[in-house]
Amino acid sequence: MQEGRKNSAARWLWWAITGLVLIALPFVLEKGFSQYYLYLATKVMVWALFAMSFNLVLGYGGMMSFGHAAFFGIGAYTCSLLLVRASCPLALAFAIAPFVAAAAGLIIGYLSVRIKGVFYFATITLSFAQLAFILAFKWRSFTFGDDGIQGIPIPALISTDETYINYYFFSLIIVVICFYVLWKIVRSPFGLILRALRENPERATFVGMKVENYRLIAFVISAFFSGIAGVLYAFLETAISPDILFWTMSGEVILMGLLGGMHVFLGPALGATIMVLLNSFITSYTEYWGMFLGIILIMIVLFFPKGVGGLMVEQYQKRMKRKGA
């Protein structure tokens, strides 16, 4: 019992330190370094939320979706179009966008989860994502086409014109809430069912589980949170283009999950952090950033198949076992 209390106290201390670091970070970055590093920190949070949302489908549900950029982009486009074309209040536009993304997830998921085989599932989700990209690219009268949406109106309270600090805290609050909800989902009986379906869907079917229904629910939830990430991205950049719907965006978020560790809750967030920082660091030194980034990622995936987060958890568990022995 005493050991349990110590572990609980250590856990609360760790969370308190993490909270203080996150609160102090924007002031340290802005005053001690530059606005660019604060922008990067905010960008990391946005991508971390997208990666965590996607991991509900891949890491916990075992569904390899190559079309999650569609929900990210639909969330961003819905909110931006409501603000630009309908002069909708920001709070209302923000609230509507993830539900539109979830509705798209319901339609795409309903047609996808019944497909047998990883390859066919990946292909059909990719096809839907490319369809969304083509609509955004070609429907110029509505989406502004390849010009994208520029000058998205952001209230002064969270504007990024002079400083990123206000928007950093706005994003931090949203992301922490979303992480907490995702944590409760994966720790719930529904999360356990998802893991069972990932490990052995045939056996799950034999015990009476409706595989398609549970996968569809996971797909819709993932689309909802991906839509929130898309809205945060639009607010951060104050401009979006059809590129955010392209399949390469889905590829990046898959790499983030693999890099950080799909079976560790915060693994995709760690992968997003590594990807964003590596991308920023390498592009500042060479125009061939894609090649170097690819080599680094290949090396990490080859030598750390469980991801960086999985490696950290594995080392921690070994250390705890040695202490117990």
Image (cartoon, grey):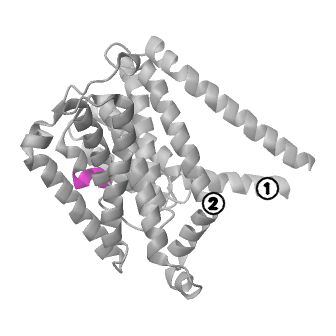
In reply to whether residue 183 is colored magenta, the answer given is no
Regarding residue 247, the answer to whether it shows in the image is: yes
Along the line of sight, the residue nearer the viewer: 91 or 320: 91
Q: CA distance from mark 1 to mark 2?
A: 31 Å
Q: What kind of residue is marked 2?
A: Ser
Q: Residue at x 52, y 84 (%)?
A: 205
Q: From this view, report whether residue 33 is shown above or below residue 186.
A: above
Query: On the image, numbered disc 1 is attached to which residue?
Result: 322
Percent position (x, y) of residue 148?
Answer: 15, 37
Percent position (x, y) of residue 120?
Answer: 29, 75
Percent position (x, y) of residue 201?
Answer: 50, 80
Label placed on residue 33 = none
Query: On the image, numbered disc 2 is attached to which residue?
Result: 188
Q: From this view, report whether residue 214 is shown above or below residue 59.
A: below
Q: Which residues are magenta?
A: 246-251
Q: Which of the 4 image quadrants contains residue 241?
A: top left
Q: What kind of residue is marked 1?
A: Arg
The answer to whether residue 85 is left or right of residue 31 is left
Tag 2, which secondary structure? Answer: loop
- Label 2 Cα neighbours within 10 Å, binned few <14 / some 14-19 / many ≥20: few
Residue at the far right in the pictured view: 2
Q: Residue at x 36, y 77 (%)?
A: 114
Q: Residue at x 85, y 48 (%)?
A: 4
Percent position (x, y) of residue 105?
Answer: 35, 59
Q: Earlier in the sequence, mark 1 or mark 2?
A: 2
